[in-house]
Amino acid sequence: NDRSTTKMPSLKEMVRLDAERAAPAWLRILVETVFFNECPEHPDASRATRSGGCNFFCVDCAGPALCCSCIEGEHDGHQIIQIRKSSRHSVVKVKDLESLLGVGEVQTYPQNNDLVVFLNKRPMEGRKPGEYRCKNCDRALLNKEYRFCSLGCKRACLEDDFTVSFAVPKGETKSSEDGAAGISTPLSKPPADTPATWDTATSVQEIRDGV
């Protein structure tokens, strides 16, 4: 009798695939960093901005949270991520991340005509009903397109679930507003108490120019 067999990937191929799906080293620091505190180096700058504190993160340096004054000079030309608030918790625009790591399967929310993802899981009061739930913290999710409620929860499941991947989808060229590959377009309402957000900044020069 003929039997259809599935060829197992070689050890070399498995190592390659595992390396591709791994989260970048800076992601751990990003999700563990506390943002929006007053800058110890530039307290006056922190009080003068709408964010009220350090709400930037340098991907290249992967150091502590930065204020608008911190990122001048030594961070010229670096990849800077701006952190925003939603329901008093830290979020990042999908379009600020999608060229750096895969955010697929993380629930997104609309905020000021952009999609955002939460950095970490949020406190829950009881267990709300829902068929689809975060694989890490059990928070109810919108639909089966999502498996995680935040980047931190996705990262937490990376080691034990080989299907979890932070690899940037191949051929991804569109922004999140256009329904980029690997990004699920949300149908959910924005979290309550969503405040106004500020323009994104991908480099120090853009921040200075107010882009």
Image (cartoon, rainbow, N blue to C red):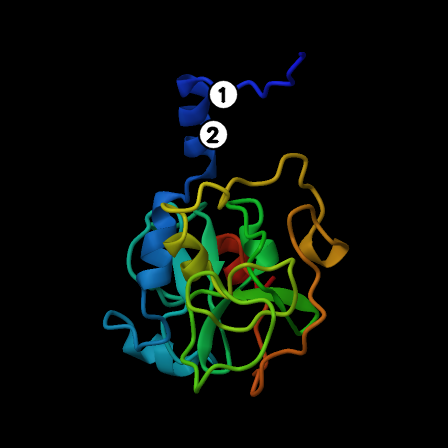
Q: Quadrant of residue 3?
A: top right
Local packing at callout 2 (Cα closer than 10 Å; few below 14, some 14-19, many 20+) is some
Q: Secondary structure at mark 2?
A: helix
Quadrant of the rendering where the N terminus is positioned: top right
Query: Which numbered circle lies on residue 9?
Result: 1
The kind of residue on which mark 2 rests is: Leu
Residue drawn at x 45%, y 41% is 162
- Is label 1 in contact with label 2 (beta carbons under 8 Å)? yes
Image location (x, y in percent) of residue 82: 48, 63
Image location (x, y in percent) of residue 16: 44, 25
Q: CA distance from mark 1 to mark 2?
A: 10 Å
- Relative to 7, is 28 above or below? below
Q: Nearer the viewer, residue 68 or 198?
A: 198
Which residue does the numbered mark 2 point to in the structure image? 17
Can the viewer see residue 205 in this picture?
yes
Residue drawn at x 42%, y 48% is 76
Can the viewer see residue 72 in this picture?
no
Image location (x, y in percent) of residue 171: 68, 35
- Relative to 146, is 194 above or below? below
For this orientation, the residue located farthest to the front is 1
Q: Quadrant of residue 132?
A: bottom right
- First along the sequence among labels 1 and 2: 1
For this orientation, the residue located farthest to the top is 1
Q: Quadrant of residue 65?
A: bottom left
Image location (x, y in percent) of residue 109: 62, 70
Q: Nearer the viewer, residue 16 or 77?
A: 16
Residue drawn at x 61%, y 61% is 211
- Relative to 114, is 77 above or below? above
Quick check: 80 left or right of 186?
Answer: left
